[in-house]
């Protein structure tokens, strides 16, 4: 696979430009890209067409898309939020288990 380091730099999130979610598959990204190209043809909207084309260039590269996902998240959020989008449940057992372990020593 050829690596492309000449990807464009955008001022806004390419996912919002194309209209896909962060967990979109490559097929969904391509379908959304084709819809946007139909909406903004280059003859009528050259600037918008270029933005959509650049956003698709970024999102079609799997490595760059992964890097984008890491850079777009909240840096103070726990790392588990990057792996699983489901709500994490915590089970607190209270202080009794901790105190019992300390008494055994």
Image (cartoon, rainbow, N blue to C red):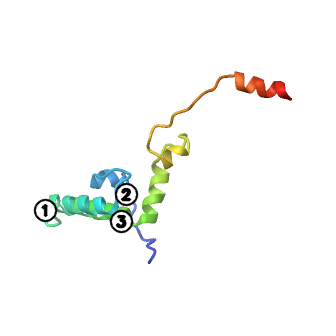
Q: Position of residue 57 (x, y in %)?
A: 34, 66
Identify the residue at image location x=17%, y=59%.
40
Q: Residue at x 46, y 65 (%)?
A: 63
Residue 93 versus residue 25 in the image, above or below: above
Work out whether 7 lies above or below 73. below
How crowded pointer 2 is (Cα within 10 Å; few <14, some 14-19, many 20+) is rated as few
Q: Which secondary structure lies at badge 2? A: loop
**Depth order, front residue of 31/76:** 31
Q: Earlier in the sequence, mark 1 or mark 2?
A: 2
Cα separation between marks 1 and 3: 24 Å
Looking at this rendering, what residue extends furthest in the right direction?
A: 105
Q: Is residue 56 left or right of residue 65?
A: left
Q: Earlier in the sequence, mark 3 or mark 2?
A: 2
Q: Determine the CA span between mark 1 and mark 2.
A: 21 Å
Quarter of the image with the C terminus is top right
Q: Which residue is mark 2?
A: 10
- Mark 1 — residue? 44
* Figure label count: 3
Name the foreground residue: 23 vs 11: 23
How far apart are labels 3 and 2 at the CA level? Answer: 15 Å
Question: Residue farthest to the bottom?
Answer: 2
């Amino acid at each position: 696979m050829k690596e492309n380091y000449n990807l464009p730099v955008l001022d806004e999130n390419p996912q919002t430009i194309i209209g896909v979610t962060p967990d979109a598959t490559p097929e969904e990204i391509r379908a959304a890209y084709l819809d946007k190209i139909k909406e903004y043809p280059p003859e009528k909207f050259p600037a918008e067409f270029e933005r959509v084309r650049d956003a698709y260039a970024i999102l079609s590269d799997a490595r760059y898309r992964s890097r984008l996902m890491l850079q777009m998240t909240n840096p103070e959020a726990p790392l588990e939020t990057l792996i699983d989008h489901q709500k994490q449940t915590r089970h607190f057992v209270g202080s009794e288990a901790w105190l019992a372990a300390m008494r055994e020593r």
